Image (cartoon, rainbow, N blue to C red):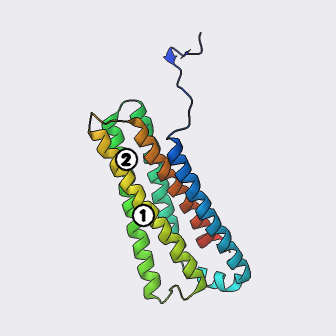
């Protein structure tokens, strides 16, 4: 059996999904957020009691719900990549739309959480909540940008002249970064005591 055939099927080429430009963007964003996470940890270490007291006002249930929503969106996104690679374009479109729907749901839940916290008087005047609003706000901007990228991928899949599986890979790569960032944000803002 040759290397080109495995189990009667052509061997898949091994490569990094997406393109170099998207990886540079993703790694740049991870670096930016990493710096902010370190800054948060330094300030938290200097005012541990105050941060812990403010942190108790966050709803872990809402944080868990948002985490489940984004992890579900990542599952849909990964399945979309598999579908487009297998030529199931309509299925890939549906999966990308489901990914986007999860992103919209995440945004609505986060907006509700912000509304509740602000109405209780927890604003950027509190050091912890200052970090909370900036971290989750910048993350929400990334979610909005990710939704636009997913929309572009769906549009390209609908146009038979412009169909490129790589656009799906790139959009999903960016979406997975958004999910990864949320998992870290959730851990340091909601769980770490």
Image location of residue 34, percent across then percent down: 63, 63
Residue ID at (33%, 43%): 93
Give the quarter of the image for residue 5. Answer: top right
* Left or right: 152, with 52 as reference point: left
> Can residue 89 be seen by looking at this rendering?
yes
Where is residue 106 shown, x and y percent of the image?
A: 42, 64
Q: Quadrant of the C terminus?
A: bottom right
Q: Is residue 190 above or below residue 16?
A: below
Residue drawn at (27%, 40%) of the image: 158
Which residue does the numbered mark 1 point to in the structure image? Answer: 106
**For residue 185, which quarter of the picture?**
bottom right
Q: Are marks 2 and 1 in contact (CB under 8 Å)?
A: no
Question: 42 or 64, which lies in front?
Answer: 42
Mark 2–mark 1 Cα distance, whole angstroms, equals 15 Å
Give the percent coordinates (x, y) of residue 151. 33, 51
Q: Is residue 62 visible?
A: no
Secondary structure under badge 1? helix
- Residue extending furthest right? 46
- Between residue 80 and residue 35, name the one nearer to us: 35
Q: Callout 2: few (<14), some (14-19), or many (20+) C-alpha neighbours within 10 Å? A: many
Badge 1: few (under 14), some or many (20 or more) residues near its Cα, within 10 Å? many
Location of residue 179 with respect to 140 vertically, above or below: above
Q: Which mark is residue 9?
A: none
Where is residue 129? Give x, y as percent.
55, 81
- The answer to whether 157 appears left or right of 14 in the picture is left
| Rendered view: 177 above or below 37 | above
| SS under mark 2 | helix
Residue with the mark numbered 2: 96
Please report the residue visible at 46 percent of the width from the left and 61 percent of the height from the top: 142
């Amino acid at each position: 059996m040759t290397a080109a055939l495995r189990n009667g099927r052509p061997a898949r080429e091994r490569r990094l999904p997406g393109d170099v430009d998207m990886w540079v963007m993703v790694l740049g964003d991870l670096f930016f957020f990493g710096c902010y996470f370190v800054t948060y940890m330094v300030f938290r270490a200097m005012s541990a009691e105050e941060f812990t007291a403010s942190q108790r006002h966050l709803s872990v249930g809402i944080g868990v719900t948002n985490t489940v929503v984004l992890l579900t969106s990542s599952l849909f996104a990964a399945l979309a990549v598999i579908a487009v690679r297998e030529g199931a374009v309509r299925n890939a479109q549906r999966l990308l739309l489901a990914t986007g729907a999860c992103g919209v749901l995440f945004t609505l839940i986060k907006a509700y959480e912000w509304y509740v916290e602000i109405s209780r008087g927890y604003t950027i005047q509190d050091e912890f909540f200052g970090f909370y609003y900036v971290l989750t706000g910048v993350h929400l901007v990334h979610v909005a940008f990710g939704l636009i990228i997913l929309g572009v991928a769906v549009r390209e899949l609908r146009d038979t002249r412009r169909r490129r599986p790589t656009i799906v890979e790139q959009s999903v790569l960016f979406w997975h970064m958004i999910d990864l960032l949320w998992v870290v944000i959730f851990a340091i803002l909601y769980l770490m005591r």
